[in-house]
Image: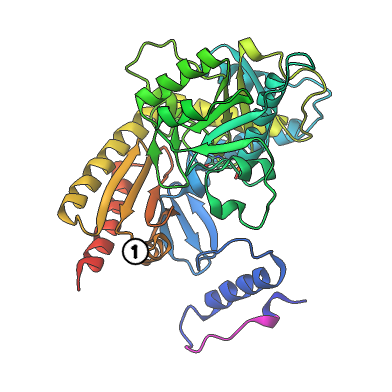
Amino acid sequence: MKIEENVQRPTSNSESFREQAVQRSIQTLFEQFVLPTYARFDLVLERGEGSYVWDVNGRRYLDFGAGIAVCALGHGNLEIADALNEQARKLVHVSNLYYTGPQARLAKRIVDLIGPGRVFFCNSGAEANEGLFKLARKFGNQGPSLGNRYEIITARESFHGRTLAGIAATGQEKVKKGFEPMVAGFRQVPFNDLEAMRDAITESTAAILIEAIQGESGITPATVEYLLGLRSLCDKCNLLLLIDEVQAGHFRTGKFHAWQRILEDRPPDFLPDGISMAKGLGGGFPIGAFWVREKFASVLGPGTHASTFGGSPLACAVALRVLDVIQRDDLAANARRIGDFLIQKLKKLQQQFPTILREVRGVGLMIGIEFDPKLKAADIVNRLHEKNLLTVPAGNSVVRFLPPLNLSQYEAEEGLHAVEAVVAQLSRP
Ligand SMILES: *Cc1c(COP(=O)(O)O)cnc(C)c1O
């Protein structure tokens, strides 16, 4: 079938007639052939360069979403393209039946950035969390005489992925609805509430899993006291402390992981027992990973876990290049500096328009702007599209900034102008 066949003809015969026809034809193909699991925005994107993307109509947008915290170096990055090209000519994939250099080097790099431990590679955030769930189950399975601990306590408003265990772990009813019965062994307590966590622990509990900064529900950082309290609770009760850094990690907050940023002024003896990673790790190339503290490195032994694609030479070579560039250009410092600037400016705007902007939260380049609950996040994101800015909705009425880590001061200001324009629009009766 020719793509053009089902095109609905635009009524106006404008100059962009052809482009609009391309947009319609692509959207029609989606309507016919792609499962309708996403409520997509009315944009068809074609190419990108740095912090900008262009749609098929040639219109340019500043991208403060970066593929939901994925494109750490922005779009069309030539160093990523070179890494892909160089490695693809050598070896794209071999099975984990063999050793390969890029996986070895990336594992060491990740361990150097976290602490003594080991890494398992997979392909996504949900899979990385799945690995942590299996780690917790295996750890809790003490054999017939000692009994079985299997429960993982997570937080309300959390997000841990869309697999069956992921939605059971996630503290949001909307992702579970219709998929019951839930995978057993997960329950949720309020976030940043140490008492609630302590009260929820039973003799079946094996682990606690939290995000250092809750992302999908609207950017809520864990407090210092919460992280330290969970660590001592886990030590006392012999539980694994697991942290989901899929969204907040990979230098977005100014440190490799968000828990490291939150605890940066504390004595450096804190370590979680397991950490999941994905989104920004490959700068857009799909890769997931989880790190396990050295003490628990033998829990998942030979034959207990596997992934066909996990840790391929191609994925690992790209992730290594992304880390090289982030460290060479000190993009952690950039994320911190530009993030501080954005947060400070947004807080000023919030004080100017307190009924429209309820709160500004965030760390580094992970920022949430909470609007009046009467305003819907998707509606504000659409208004920002009108001003050529891409952002990501979260929760009910939060708009997220998750831009590339190499965002410039000029681009930050351009994004702020778009927000100011929309807030001014909303403030007019
Ligand atoms: C996005 C996300 C996931 C799921 O990652 P996928 O790659 O979509 O499977 C898990 N946890 C957190 C905190 C996330 O933001």
Residue assigned mark 1: 375
Counting from the top left corner in percent of width and height, residue 299 is at 71, 16
Residue 21 part of the magenta segment: no
Work out whether 320 lies above or below 267: below
Counting from the top left corner in percent of width and height, residue 159 is at 53, 43
Which secondary structure type mostly characterizes the magenta part of the structure?
loop
Tell me the SS state at disc 1.
Answer: loop
Left or right: residue 391 versus residue 373 is right
The segment highlighted magenta reads 5-12
Counting from the top left corner in percent of width and height, residue 85 is at 66, 38
Coloring basis for residues: rainbow
What amino acid is labelled 1 in the image?
Leu
Q: Residues within 10 Å of mark 1 (few under 14, many from 20)?
A: some
Work out whether 78 lies above or below 135: below
Q: Residue at x 50, y 53 (%)?
A: 48
Left or right: residue 381 versus residue 243 is left
Residue 219 sits in quarter:
top left
Of 392 and 377, nearer the camera is 377
Of 281 and 239, nearer the camera is 239
